[in-house]
Image (tube, grey):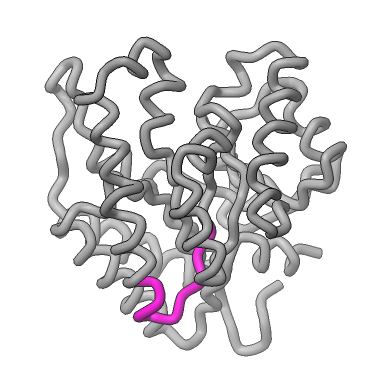
Amino acid sequence: MWPEGKRAAAAFTFDFDAEEVWIGEDPANASKPGVLSQGTYGAKVAVPLILEALERFGVRATFFVPGRVAERHPERVNEIVAAGHELAHHGYTHTSPTALAPDEEEAELTKGLEVLRSFGTEIVGYRSPSWDFSASTEELLQARGFRYSSNLMDDLRPYRHKRSGLVEIPIHWILDDAAHFWFDGATWTKKISTADEVGAIWEAEFLGYRRLGGAYVLTMHPQIMGRPYRLALLEHMLEWVTGHDDVWVATCAEIAERVP
């Protein structure tokens, strides 16, 4: 499956949710600037820092972006595209397709595609705001020409969905920064892990994917990974992964093209 001389693949992916992750969860948050400022940091500070790090290590990443984030922060999306990174679909609003009627989900996909395509790049990948499908999702993605999904956790290697032929690029919570770092302000019960803890987990998982020939997909959020301490972790992972010559580092779209 992988290019000659490569035993595994790796992708650095970013869900650029900005304020929309809080608004999609509860529209009442739209009137709470303190809450939204957590996401604003992602667009205002974190994305430029992340783009600098990616450029320094020569890595092209995949950015999954909700349409409303692209409308709210077009300058950042333009910077992502201009830097040569892949732009992919992450809903129009940050709303789970499982919470939508079929016509609402279709409208979300259509509007999000319209917004993202306006940045002059092909949109071939989809990641649900909830990493989940409704009964209609696969059919809707197929009808709109998507080539891959990155939502399910049932494998280490990409595969094709039998019904639609859509490529699935599996992900997992253990490789998602939110599972380790996202503070729960409502209950104050969720621990914020240290970067050293998470780095040890991510390195060990990487070595496992490498040994088994899988596709190692890190999922990160600018407002989370773009904090100063965690940027050092990102830089370490960029250096660590690219330092393995037998691992192919690629965008999700490039990985999807390798699936027979």
Q: Please count the marks in the image.
A: 0
Could you say where residue 220 lies in the image, as x and y percent from the top left?
38, 50
- Front residue of this view, candidates 87 and 128: 87
Residue at position x 67%, y 61% in the image: 253
Q: Which quarter shows the C terminus?
A: bottom right
Q: Is residue 198 above or below residue 37?
A: below
Give residue 40's quadrant in the image. top left
Where are the magenta residues, as a range? 53-62
Compared across the picture, whether 133 is left or right of 233 comes to: right
Could you say where residue 166 lies in the image, as x and y percent from the top left?
78, 47
Magenta stretch encompasses residue 56? yes
Could you say where residue 193 lies in the image, as x and y percent from the top left?
16, 45
Residue 99 seen in the current view: yes
Residue 214 seen in the current view: no
Give residue 109's quadrant in the image. top right
Residue at position x 51%, y 79% in the image: 247
- Front residue of this view, candidates 177 and 78: 78
Q: Which quarter shows the N terminus?
A: bottom right
Q: Is residue 6 above or below residue 40?
A: below
Compared across the picture, whether 63 is left or right of 191 comes to: right
Could you say where residue 141 lies in the image, as x and y percent from the top left?
77, 37
Residue at position x 65%, y 65% in the image: 255
- Front residue of this view, candidates 60 and 4: 60
Magenta stretch encompasses residue 24? no
Compared across the picture, whether 99 is left or right of 124 comes to: left
